[in-house]
Image (cartoon, rainbow, N blue to C red):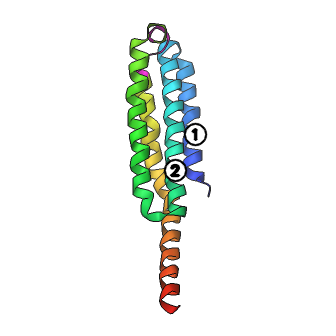
């Protein structure tokens, strides 16, 4: 199952952030580029994980969503602390710009992935209903 709206949205966001980071330059531009790239990667993986469980075992989809959220939250804290307290990185990458840009894909992905995953949700509901009907008639 592809997630076209989510993928296109993340790619379009990456182009916009890349242009802004290029224009801004320096440590702020580097923080923007790294933050968005990592945030988009993890947001995309989290949505793909949720889509996988919607196909395989729909009742586990909520857990997959919470796992994705936890990984993004831990990654935000960990990478921000690394960028803040490792001197070589702190000189070249703005941790504030990183953190703000890291959060942008999460906000962008939410409506797009909901739109993409709604097809899977309706498909899994129809499949579950068909399974229930088949069991009753058997």
Q: Going by the image, does 134 lie left or right of 66?
A: right
Q: Which mark is residue 59?
A: none
Q: Is residue 83 magenta?
A: no
* Residue count near mark 1 (Cα–Cα under 10 Å), binned few <14, some 14–19, many ≥20: few
Residue at (60%, 52%) from the top-left corner?
4
Secondary element at image label 1: helix
Q: Quadrant of the N terminus?
A: bottom right
What residue is pinned by disc 2? 49
Q: Is residue 34 left or right of residue 86?
A: right
Point out the frontmost of discs 2 and 1: 2
Residue pictured at 43% horizontal, 38% vertical: 71
Q: Quadrant of residue 98?
A: top left
Q: Which residue is mark 1?
A: 12
Instruction: Examine the structure image and report whether residue 95 is included in the region drawn in magenta.
Output: yes
Magenta segment main secondary structure: helix
Please say if 75 is above or below 8: above
Q: Foreground: 78 or 7?
A: 78
Compared with 116, 134 (above or below) is below
Residue in view at x 48 percent, y 12 percent: 89
Q: Nearer the viewer, residue 137 or 117?
A: 137
Asked if residue 37 is positioned above or below residue 62 in the image, the reply reads above
| Image coords of residue 53 (percent x, y) | 50, 58
């Amino acid at each position: 199952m592809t997630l076209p709206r989510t993928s296109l949205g993340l790619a379009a966001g990456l182009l916009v952030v890349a242009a802004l980071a290029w224009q801004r330059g320096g440590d702020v531009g580097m923080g923007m580029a790294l933050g968005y790239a990592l945030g988009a990667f993890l947001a995309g993986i989290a949505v793909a994980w949720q889509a996988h469980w919607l196909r395989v075992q729909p009742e586990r989809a909520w857990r997959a969503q919470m796992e994705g959220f936890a990984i993004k939250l831990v990654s935000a804290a960990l990478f921000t602390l690394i960028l803040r307290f490792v001197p070589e990185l702190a000189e070249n990458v703005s941790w504030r710009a990183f953190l703000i840009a890291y959060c942008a894909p999460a906000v962008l992905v939410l409506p797009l992935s909901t739109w993409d995953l709604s097809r899977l949700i309706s498909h899994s509901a129809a499949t579950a209903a068909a399974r229930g009907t088949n069991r009753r008639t058997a």
